[in-house]
Amino acid sequence: MPKILVTGGAGYIGSHTVYHLLRAGYDAVVVDDLSRGYRRNVEAARLREFDLRDTERLTRLCREEQFDAVVHFAAFIAVGESMQKPEMYFGNNVGGTLSLLEAMEAAGVRRLVFSSTAAVYGFPERIPIPEDHPYAPVSPYGESKLMVEKILGWLDRSSGVRSIALRYFNACGAEPGSGLGEEHDPETHLIPLLFRAMQTGQPVTIFGDDYDTPDGTCIRDYIHVSDLASAHILALDALIGGGKSDAMNVGTGAGHSVLEVLRAVERVTGSKVPCATGPRRQGDSSALVADSGKLRRTLGWAPRYLSLDEIVATAWEFEKNRGGKQ
Ligand code: UFG
């Protein structure tokens, strides 16, 4: 049974990936400092609660556990916050990764699946976006992820570390029955904010309706979190099987506007979502849609959730059971 170190495994995508890893027959140990993740998302026996930048402790853990591979989620992810606190983002996202790579080197662990982002492309020149599209991040968050991808490129050449960077588009939804779902503090993501507006009656702000899109609102590629998790498992299988380093987009290839998502939430919940149009949010691209052909071709990945209503329904199921707990 391959043993995997999952950093950031108490967060939204990390906890879903651990859930699916265990069901796929892997063993997993989670390192998370719980600065953004939730204790309830991880079985106590699997959790090691500390900051990745504690290289000594991480090295000890890697030596003791003899991991076959690492899946590295632990990072700060809020684009807006990264504009306010770039030092914190580079320190945690790049500094934490360097510490992890040092510990892996010391313990002889040489396979890594890295949680990257569509934010490495910035404002795309074309849609859908292929992996060889120019990189032009427009936030310290996107830049920090690109910096790590570049570091991994050098380590592939010089230290024999094999890695697959998965560039996520808009993660959403929840695995039914898992008790896991999307929750951030503060919440900045569209679908949870639409639920909140519906529940509180406080209108959600639509960030701009004057984009060059059919209804004027931004288009995104909403990918179900369990489909993201399955991409990680395929990437791990490939690396453990001797596969080479790569970077791959993970998205459905379908774009939905903010208003389309709002309508989907109304259909699924049967309630109105109060909304108001506000100004554009700094750093938002009009459209981000993935070309995930490489992931499909090389790893045989295919998303199971293709309907926006079905994705929203899984998110709503989680939200209802959460009962407004923050
Ligand atoms: N939006 C609103 N109102 C809100 C919140 C969001 O109109 O209150 C809009 C945004 O303008 C955007 C869409 O809803 O068009 C989705 O916004 P999110 O904040 O949910 O997600 P982003 O597309 O901004 O960002 C997500 C991840 C990032 C990642 C990026 C890559 O959160 O970590 O996708 O595409 F970098």
Image (spheres, rainbow, N blue to C red):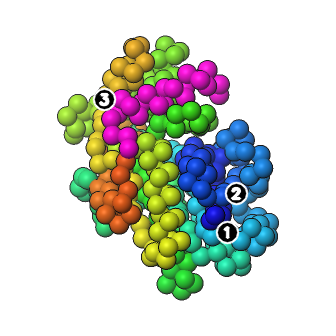
Which dot marks residue 29? 2
* Viewport quadrant of the C terminus: top right
Q: Is residue 325 magenta?
A: yes
Q: Is residue 13 above or below residue 273?
A: below
**Residue wearing tag 1:** 67
Left/right of residue 159 with respect to residue 39 in the rendered view: left
Q: Main secondary structure of the magenta part?
A: helix
Decide: few, some or many residues near mark 3? Use Cα within 10 Å; few <14, some 14-19, many ≥20: some
Q: Earlier in the sequence, mark 2 or mark 3?
A: 2
Q: Where is residue 159 in the image (x, y as percent from the top left)?
A: 57, 84
Q: Nearer the viewer, mark 2 or mark 3?
A: 2
Q: Is residue 311 magenta?
A: yes
Left/right of residue 168 with respect to residue 183 in the rendered view: left
Residue at x 35% of width, y 33% of height: 308
Q: Is residue 286 above or below residue 115?
A: above
Q: Where is residue 46 in the image (x, y as percent from the top left)?
A: 74, 52
The amino acid type of the residue labelled 3 equals Glu
Decide: few, some or many residues near mark 2? Use Cα within 10 Å; few <14, some 14-19, many ≥20: many
The amino acid type of the residue labelled 2 equals Val
The amino acid type of the residue labelled 1 equals Phe
The number of callouts visible is 3
Which dot marks residue 260? 3
Magenta-highlighted residues: 304-326
SS at mark 2 in the image: strand
Q: Position of residue 15 (x, y in %)?
A: 61, 46
Q: Is residue 195 visible to us here?
A: yes
Asked whether 315 or 149 is in front, the reply is 315
Asked whether 207 or 156 is in front, the reply is 156
Q: Which of marks 1 and 3 is nearer the N terminus?
A: 1
Q: Position of residue 28 (x, y in %)?
A: 66, 57
Contact flag, marks 1 and 2 (Cβ < 8 Å): yes
Left/right of residue 201 with respect to residue 183 in the rendered view: left
